[in-house]
Image: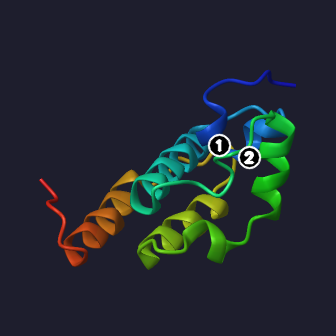
Amino acid sequence: AAGFRGTVRYAPLSCHIRRETCRKDDIESWLYQQIEMTRGALPWRSMDDKRDDERARYDVGLRELMGGCPREYIEILRYIDSLRFYDKPDYNKIYKVHTFDRKICGRDVS
């Protein structure tokens, strides 16, 4: 089993269940950062203990996690969830979805 690596706040679920991480987990961590910047906080922000944080991630619903975020974030999350351990993520696809989201929200994309 893999030991915990990274920041608890942005750690992917794989990290919490001590599974070896892969490229899709890097994208999951990045998405949590995007959600936090968009919403101002993640639902598990106030959790101090890693175990509480892990439980909160399993218990939080999509609406609670993504509330106030562009719907494109959900598309990215579903794409991440469709990947398997050895899959190479289509970073270009994620970039295009994220760039589109930023354009429709009126944020600079350069």
Q: Nearer the viewer, residue 90 or 33?
A: 33
What is the C-alpha distance between the residues marked 2 and 1? 17 Å
Residue 59 image offset from top left, x and y in percent: 82, 63
> Do the numbered discs 2 and 1 sit on residues whose CB atoms are within 8 Å?
no
Q: Which mark is residue 99?
A: none
At x 40% / y 53%, what residue is drawn?
Answer: 37
Locate residue 35 relative to residue 83 in the image: left or right: left
User: Which image quarter is the N terminus in?
Assistant: top right
At x 19% / y 65%, what residue is drawn?
Answer: 107
**Looking at the image, how many numbered discs can be counted on the residues?**
2
> Looking at the image, is 83 positioned above or below residue 69?
above
Residue 58 image offset from top left, x and y in percent: 81, 58
Q: Where is mark 1, residue-wise?
A: 86
> Looking at the image, is 38 positioned above or below residue 55?
below
Amino acid type, mark 2: Leu
Circle 1 SS class: loop
Amino acid type, mark 1: Tyr
> Looking at the image, is 14 positioned above or below residue 65?
above
* Crowdedness near tag 2: few (<14), some (14–19) or many (≥20) residues, C-alpha within 10 Å: some
Q: Which mark is residue 13?
A: 2
Mark 2 vs mark 1: in front: 2
Locate residue 62 relative to residue 102 in the image: left or right: right
> Looking at the image, is 16 positioned above or below residue 81?
above
